[in-house]
Amino acid sequence: MSTDLTEALDLDAIRDRVDTVLADFLRRPPSTVPSQRGCGDELAQALRDFVLAPGKRIRALLCVLGWQAAGGGDGEEALWRTAASLEIFHAFALIHDDIIDSSQTRRGRPSAHRAFAARHRARPDADVFGIHAAILLGDLALTCSDALMHTAGLTTRQRDTVLPLIDTMRGEVLLGQHLDLMATGGPTDDVEHAMAIARLKTAKYTVERPLHLGAALAGADRELFDLCTAYALPLGEAFQLRDDLLGVFGDPALTGKPVLDDLRSGKATVLMALALRHATPHQRRTLEAHIGRPDLDAEGAARVRHILQRTGARDMVEGMISERYEAALRALDSTMLSPQTLHALRHIATRAVVRTA
Amino acid sequence: MSTDLTEALDLDAIRDRVDTVLADFLRRPPSTVPSQRGCGDELAQALRDFVLAPGKRIRALLCVLGWQAAGGGDGEEALWRTAASLEIFHAFALIHDDIIDSSQTRRGRPSAHRAFAARHRARPDADVFGIHAAILLGDLALTCSDALMHTAGLTTRQRDTVLPLIDTMRGEVLLGQHLDLMATGGPTDDVEHAMAIARLKTAKYTVERPLHLGAALAGADRELFDLCTAYALPLGEAFQLRDDLLGVFGDPALTGKPVLDDLRSGKATVLMALALRHATPHQRRTLEAHIGRPDLDAEGAARVRHILQRTGARDMVEGMISERYEAALRALDSTMLSPQTLHALRHIATRAVVRTA
């Protein structure tokens, strides 16, 4: 284990190092065509603004920890570029997701399409223009995440395992987004379907695949991949369940996200599915009358929250989070991991489920 | 030169072979997650429908010809997968472009977002849903074009040259799309800017980079890359100029595209910039009053067409097409190319500029 790696256990230091790779790479993304410099700078600048805004960098951290769990090795440069690439890919996912969810803000700042609309507010079509520019911005982010991987200095063996794994991860998250989109607007009591979406969109994408990618870079064996999965899937589900609770009961000042968004869009969450499943006919009618209404007001939201509590749905979700948190920690009871890695993975698990933002 | 290659000079045979690779690959794209089969099939099916619809496959053809120009070599499988990957990437570009241009049709069929809206017309938000699903469909196409490249069986040398070249191509076309988006709606007489957009969006993306990619796979030297560029840029510009003329003067029954779209959206074409530059003040006012109006009717379009002819803009564009066509053919006067490759490249040049669809 190299000195660098020991230092890397400082999670803030990992984050800083990833941010440095991102800033260096985005100084000159592939869309910077020499003859067009000036003209084309808005897109590149918007990408820098979005990617370099402060974030949790959870996927990059997990990628580094997966590498570490597998014993690290040579080629740290490839690791850092892969970790950074995951964060640019995530920017892509967020930019397009915010368009699809009509989210006005992201991390307390205007979402990408709203930022474009604001910058071009003199245009008569500023709102639509903003959406269209953000579609392209997301596309550029996806392209940049590739370009970073393609110049990461991977060995042939790494390329052959890591690039297909990235493609699988992308396919999974896109399928999750699509199922989410289909299910939004008409919430049902199908708890299993809501959980399947959470598994694809969050558990696999946010936790399992980043760990796998890091582990694959270090040449991990099947046993370690399985251990990562056993930790990642329950933890990722717990992470999403916590998000669902914060989306309805959270403090917008802390989450940076308007608290009515999830209810207004009618997101198909496990929380909502449980409430519908356990609602009295009267409660059910109230939920159906309020969920998915773009004009839902604070009073309507309060009624929904009341039902989420009275049906026991909120408590059930808290219970599911605890169960999954414990299952994730149990998965770490293995002699395969160093005490340092173990400590970091436990720390991340706790932060993922016990949080206010 | 292999037997396969000789056969490959039959452009229809190239197209068929690319279509076979596409159909095989898309049977199981990366978003096909075993546990979600059924649910997630709509996205995969939509991708198949879009990609496998009959098309010119011009980028795939040029990729094969670039490879051929460089003398071909072993590893034809990698060539075919790269050529097919370009077509999936192009599907991505078209799907998102049609959203941005609000195009209702593509190749005479509903555009991807309109097809989704039609399939989900029972939803109250069918139109917006269609756009959001098509954003994800485009993202999946981009992901699939990567996945195909990442499993193309490239040698290390090929990967190190070809993957970064693909990333550059993507950056160029996205920058072109962005500049196009910025310029649309308020047409100007800036002919050079309109041409710069055409160069990025079409000349480099449609002609130069596909040739370069094929040439790079076969290990071409700088001299051949330069020859490809000398042929591709004027030809690609001519191709776009022809497209601009067809967008205003074409027969919708042949182009598969409503003839008012370009005028209604106010596309910043060289044709329009030339007309504005050479218009009388009265003609200019008429153009400015009509271009970019979503409600432009057939009578208004007829007035615009009349001005495009009276200012000489239409003839000037025809002249520019001829000049560029000849420059492209002159670039082929080289001993580097086999008679077969020469013949195919000349044939493609002619078809690109002399066409009605």
Image (spheres, coloured by chain):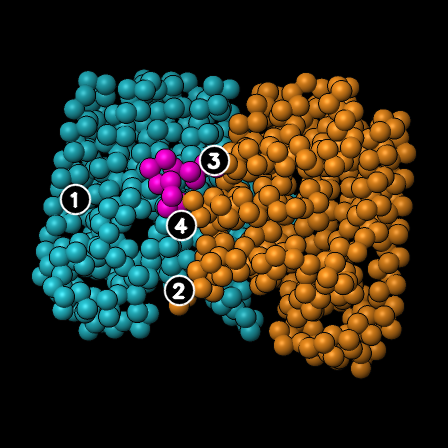
Chain colours: A cyan, B orange
Residue A315: x %, y % from top left: 10, 52
Q: Nearer the viewer, mark 1 or mark 3?
A: 3
Task: Provide the secondary structure element on which disc 1 rests.
Answer: helix
Task: Provide the secondary structure element on which disc 2 rests.
Answer: loop
Question: Tag 1: Cα neighbours inside 10 Å, few (<14), some, or many (≥20)?
Answer: many
Residue B86: x %, y % from top left: 62, 39
Residues at discs 2 and 4 both on one chain: no
Residue at the spot 62% in from the left edge and 47% down from the top edge: B53
Residues at discs 2 and 1 both on one chain: no
Q: Amino acid at mark 4?
A: His
Read off the residue under disc 3.
B28
Q: Which label is found at residue A178? A: 4
User: Looking at the figure, which quarter contains the C terminus of chain B?
Assistant: bottom right
Q: Amino acid at mark 1?
A: Ile
First-in-chain label (1 vs 4): 4
Residue A146: x %, y % from top left: 51, 37
Residues at discs 4 and 3 both on one chain: no
Read off the residue under disc 1.
A321
Question: Tag 4: Cα neighbours inside 10 Å, few (<14), some, or many (≥20)?
Answer: many
Give the CA distance from mark 4 to mark 3: 17 Å
The span picked out in magenta is: B29-40
**Left or right of residue A316: residue A234:** right
**Left or right of residue B1: residue B33:** left
